[in-house]
Image (tube, rainbow, N blue to C red):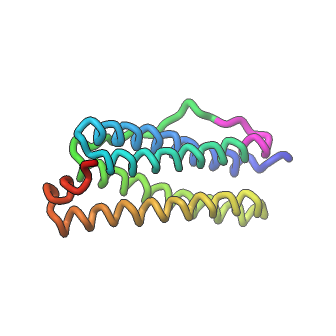
């Protein structure tokens, strides 16, 4: 089924966001593992895997719409030098993703491509959950203080 070129471009833009997020989250996960914060490592790694699944869905949809998935473009990756900076960088990335998915959902609806819209809504729900998890980590760091919070992240 030939898809709308503007929608395919939008899906490729979302794909670039997801591929960037995967890299950022994996680096943060491995840094936390190296620092001995195993629980944070698993949390970041799980989020990276979710983003991989999103990328897979986007690639599949682009192909279905007879487009070409572009996997060679990444956004700037923002690696935090310490856990609070990592979490804040991830929060900013998720905010951008939520905004981009909301805009893509509107576009898909305007083009009456409801199957694509449904896929984007599913991914948006995951991104909302990621934002909630990140904000929870930030709240814990604020209430506990960073040293106490980090002591809870050791396995």
Q: Give the residues in magenta.
A: 62-69
How many numbered callouts? 0
Q: Which of 15 and 146 is in front in this view?
A: 146
Residue 76 seen in the figure = no
Residue 46 seen in the figure = yes
Residue drawn 40% across and 41% down? 24
**Residue 155 screen position, x and y as percent:** 28, 48
| In this picture, residue 119 sits left or right of residue 52 | right
Residue drawn 72% across and 66% down? 109
Q: Is residue 136 above or below residue 54?
A: below
Q: Quadrant of residue 28?
A: top left
Q: Residue furthest top?
A: 72
**Residue 104 screen position, x and y as percent:** 62, 58
Residue drawn 64% across and 48% down? 11
Q: Residue furthest front?
A: 155
**Residue 53 screen position, x and y as percent:** 59, 46
Residue drawn 30% across and 39% down? 33
């Amino acid at each position: 089924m030939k898809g709308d070129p503007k929608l395919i471009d939008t899906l490729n833009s979302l794909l670039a966001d997801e591929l960037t997020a995967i890299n950022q989250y994996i680096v943060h996960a491995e840094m936390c593992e190296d620092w001995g914060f195993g629980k944070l490592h698993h949390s970041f790694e799980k989020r990276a895997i979710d983003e991989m699944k999103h990328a897979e869905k986007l690639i599949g949809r682009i192909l279905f719409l007879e487009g070409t998935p572009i996997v060679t473009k990444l956004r700037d990756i923002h690696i935090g030098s310490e856990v609070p900076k990592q979490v804040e960088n991830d929060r900013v990335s998720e905010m951008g993703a939520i905004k981009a998915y909301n805009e893509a959902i509107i576009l898909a609806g305007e083009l009456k491509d409801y199957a694509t819209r449904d896929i984007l809504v599913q991914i948006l729900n995951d991104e909302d959950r990621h934002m909630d998890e990140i904000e929870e980590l930030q709240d814990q760091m604020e209430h506990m203080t960073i040293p106490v919070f980090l002591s809870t992240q050791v396995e």
